[in-house]
Amino acid sequence: MRVALDIDGTITEKPEFFSLLSRAVRREGGMVIVVTSRLGTPEAEKETRKELLAWKIEFDELIFLPPAGDPRRLTCPHEGLDWYEKYLWQKVKVCLDRGVDLVFEDDPKVISIFEKYAPAIRVFLPC
């Protein structure tokens, strides 16, 4: 099982649940990927890792979406998406590339993009 977790509005809303989930997935041999649209500066990455550690979130990979102009940014091939949707589409691409089965995400735009471009990946809202 491969699970992707968003941070803001997801892990931040239910850190105890996501701590238990992340540990259970990894204990059973699964993979946990944290994918965030937070700014990926070295300082932000250090602070984010510190927060995840404080919440006891176990993960295999922490991915920050590269902003416009960043050479690491993934090019969205889909016409009809605005600039922000193309930015968010990177979450879908990351999950597709890593064979993610489940995603926990709170942003309706991201969820909509998953439904359209990765319908086989199950998306759950943090309640």
Image: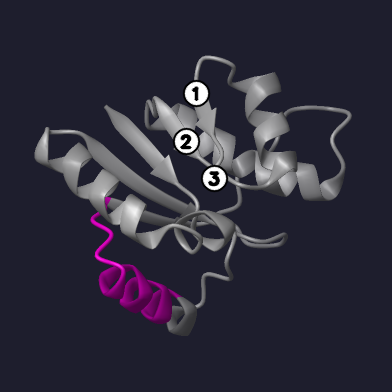
The residue tagged 3 is: 127
Q: Main secondary structure of the magenta part?
A: helix
Residue 47 or 77: which is nearer the viewer? 47
Disc 2 secondary structure class:
strand
Disc 3 secondary structure class:
loop
Q: Is residue 38 covered in magenta?
A: no
Q: Residue 102 appears at what percent x and percent y?
A: 42, 29
Mark 1 surroundings: few (<14), some (14-19) or many (≥20) residues within 10 A: some
Relative to 117, is 52 above or below?
below
The residue tagged 2 is: 103
Mark 3 surroundings: few (<14), some (14-19) or many (≥20) residues within 10 A: few
| Distance of label 1 from label 2 (alpha carbons) | 6 Å
Q: Nearer the observer, disc 3 or disc 1?
A: 3
Give the residue type that dot 1 points to: Arg
Q: Which residues are magenta?
A: 45-60
Q: Is residue 124 something that shows in the picture? A: yes
Point out the tag, 3 or 1, that comes first from the N-terminus: 1
Which residue appears at 23% of the width and 56% of the height? Answer: 58
Image quarter of residue 32: top left
| Distance of label 3 from label 1 (alpha carbons) | 15 Å
**Dot 1 and dot 2 residues touching (CB under 8 Å):** yes
The residue tagged 1 is: 122
Give the residue type that dot 3 points to: Cys
Give the residue type that dot 2 points to: Val
